[in-house]
Amino acid sequence: MKLALALAFVIAACGSSQPVASIDASPDAVELDQNGCPPYPVEMLSIADGDTAYTPKLLQFGQRTYVRFTTSSMHDMNFYIMGGQEQQPFMTIGFSTTRCIYYPQGPAFYDVKCSVHGEVATVRVANPGP
Ligand SMILES: [Zn+2]
């Protein structure tokens, strides 16, 4: 079983080396996989089927950061501008989805809410500083 998983991983790794999507407008272009994720580690916000809260509940990071959002079959993520008056989310990541979002500039603050159970997380993009 372990061998089968290892082989699957190797095959997946080979497959993901093919550029599916890329940003070619800048000199520091990054090749992204089918979920919009770069090859290096990213910040993560996730929730599994049995969870009753997002992990972490507060996600803070600097600007020019990719964040990987992972939902389960029972929870989704709906994004609202923190302190905004909007009743509808400006972005939704549906059930059983993995997606990376790039945050080019801080400061920015978002509330993330599950449409089924109402659990909430906060995403803070730090101020760029001096
Ligand atoms: Zn939920």
Image (cartoon, rainbow, N blue to C red):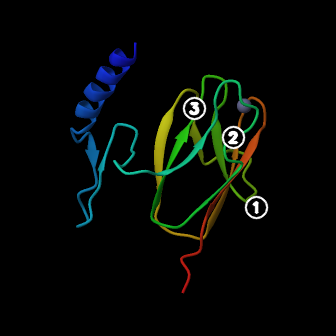
- Residue 90: % across, % down: 61, 48
Q: Earlier in the sequence, mark 1 or mark 3?
A: 1
**Can you tell which quarter of the image residue 106 is in?**
bottom right
Q: Earlier in the sequence, mark 2 or mark 1?
A: 2
- Mark 1 neighbour class, 10 Å CA radius: few under 14, some 14 to 19, many 20 or more: few
Q: Which residue extends farthest bottom? A: 130
- Residue 129: % across, % down: 56, 81
Q: Amino acid at mark 2?
A: Tyr
Q: Does the numbered disc 1 mark a residue whose Cβ is under 8 Å from ligand 1?
A: no
Q: Which residue is mark 1?
A: 83
Who's the residue at 26% across and 59% down the image?
A: 29
Q: Does the numbered disc 3 mark a residue whose Cβ is under 8 Å from ligand 1?
A: no
Q: Amino acid at mark 1?
A: Gly
Who's the residue at 48% across and 50% down the image?
A: 101
Secondary structure under tag 2 reads loop
Disc 2 versus disc 1: distance between alpha carbons? 20 Å
Instruction: Say if 112 sits above or below 128 in the image.
Output: above
Q: Amino acid at mark 3?
A: Gly
Disc 3 versus disc 2: distance between alpha carbons? 14 Å
Instruction: Say if 40 sits above or below 46 in the image.
Output: below
- Residue 5: % across, % down: 37, 20
Q: Which residue is mark 3?
A: 94
Disc 1 versus disc 3: distance between alpha carbons? 23 Å
- Residue 66: % across, % down: 46, 54
Check the picture and name the quadrant holding the C terminus. Answer: bottom right
The answer to whether mark 3 and mark 2 are in CB contact below 8 A is: no
Foreground residue among 112 and 67: 67
Check the picture and name the quadrant holding the N terminus. Answer: top left
Who's the residue at 55% across and 47% down the image?
A: 44
